[in-house]
Image (tube, grey):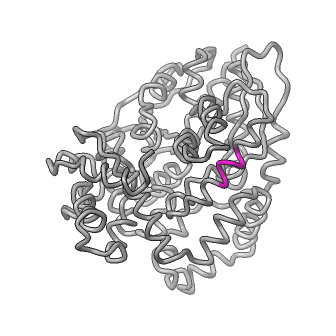
Amino acid sequence: MPTMAEELEKTLQLCNKCGLCLAGCPIYKVTGIEWTSARGRVALLRSVFLDERLKLTDLKDPIFNCLTCNGCTEHCPPGVQTGDIIFRARQELLKQKGDSWIQRLLFQKMLPNPERLHKASRLLRLADVTGLHTLARKTGLTRLAGDAGKAEAMVPRVPAGEGLEAIKRAVKKIDKPGYSAAYFLGCYAPNFAPERAAATIRVLNKNRVEVTVPDFACCGLPAAGYGDMESARDLARKNIAIASKLKADAIVTPCASCSSFLKDYIKLLADDAEWAEKAKEFTGKVKDISEFLVDIGLNTEMGELKRKVTFHDPCHLAHYQKIKDQPRTILKSIPGIEFVEMNEADMCCGAAGSYAFKNYDLSQKVLERKMGNVAKTGADTLVSSCPACIMQLACGAGQQKLPISVLEIVDLLDEAYQNARGKD
């Protein structure tokens, strides 16, 4: 079996420098700078790993201001997986420079423990209700944090509630279930959107799916995104161990980033003799919610929604999982919906997880291009299926004062199913 270095060398050599990737790179589109494109980044990394003319430590910006959206791969004849290359470069850079105490705290202490993460979110709520957030902005303290301080305003306010335990109370037995699903909550829903999580459960119930809510940890993508693959593997093992005790037909999540990375456990643990087969069984059950609902046959007994809707494809849904038709099938199945396709619908919105906290200005330039395309649709509702995208798009709608609601697919489905009950 080839080593990671050998695989990286082979992947880097696939690039034939044709430049077709430029059409799918959001950063290149807003900068016009060659090294920000996939071709440019690959050329720089070839100079590190193949030609040894540069040091990896010289390339911090090219390594970390890539969105890893894989939009370039959609246009690449040999299918160079630029996202994988960048992740490997970050991993190697972490080995050379080490990680920060903040990364160790987050990836090794907080994300493996949902309860600790929830307690941390309560501190954010305390800052809200006491006015500390407002005070920090008015006094300019947030500006001292640089990009992170600018991006802080994008973080949604933490609602009152009990997080995971409150969501679990929404779980109920249903009559004659056709399927069973373990709901992978992720980090966002229990801490920032418990009502959206409850809506997800209701939608699954309406489709004859009996739901359980296990105590899964973070999927591991945030750790992998910063090069900490060992923490990502530890999280994968923890989630696989939890899933092994469940009797569920599928592991379902409405978060495209989570479903994408959960499906990657088979690659993440491929060299682990103890966990490789378990990872294969686990990934075989993982389904994005739009994929799952279409697969089992969407319940179309819904009430009418008078909305003009457009859809933004999350990168981890469209580019990584190749799931594009299913969300549109669902939206077009809702009575009363007028669906309008957006130009560059699958172009990254600039969210990319915590990208704005390190590259705020670039993130905003990419977002501005996206919101321009949204405005041209004339839609009153913008839908996506990734929490990071939802936060970013809602921020863009507010900044440009667009009269548009930013929702997830489950929000519309839940409303449509409730309207159906109202007609009876």
Q: Of residues 378 and 160, which is closer to you in this image?
A: 160
Magenta stretch: give its range. Answer: 234-239
Q: Quadrant of residue 295?
A: top right
Residue with the most extreme front position: 1
Question: Of residues 387 and 331, which is closer to you in this image?
Answer: 387
Find residue 244 and report its horizontal and vertical position in percent: 75, 36
The quadrant of the image that shows the N terminus is top left
Residue 344, placed above or below residue 361 = above
Is residue 347 visible in the rendered image? The answer is yes
Front residue of 235/182: it is 235
Q: Where's the C terminus, which quadrant? A: top right
Which residue is rendered at x = 85% and y = 39% of the image?
169
Horizontal side of 220 relative to 377 (left or right) equals right
Rendered position, 317 above or below 15: above
Measured as percent of width and height from the top left, residue 287 is found at 59, 31
Q: x and y percent of residue 296 in the render?
A: 61, 17
Total numbered labels: 0
- Tell me the quarter of the picture where residue 175 sits: top right
Q: Residue at x 36, y 60 (%)?
A: 66
Query: What residue is shown at x 68% (from left), y 48% (from top)?
Result: 237
Whether residue 261 appears in magenta in the rendering, the answer is no
Specify whether 262 is left or right of 128: left
| Residue 400 in sight | no
SS majority, magenta:
helix
Q: Is residue 13 above or below residue 146?
A: above
- Give residue 210's position: percent from left, percent from top: 77, 24
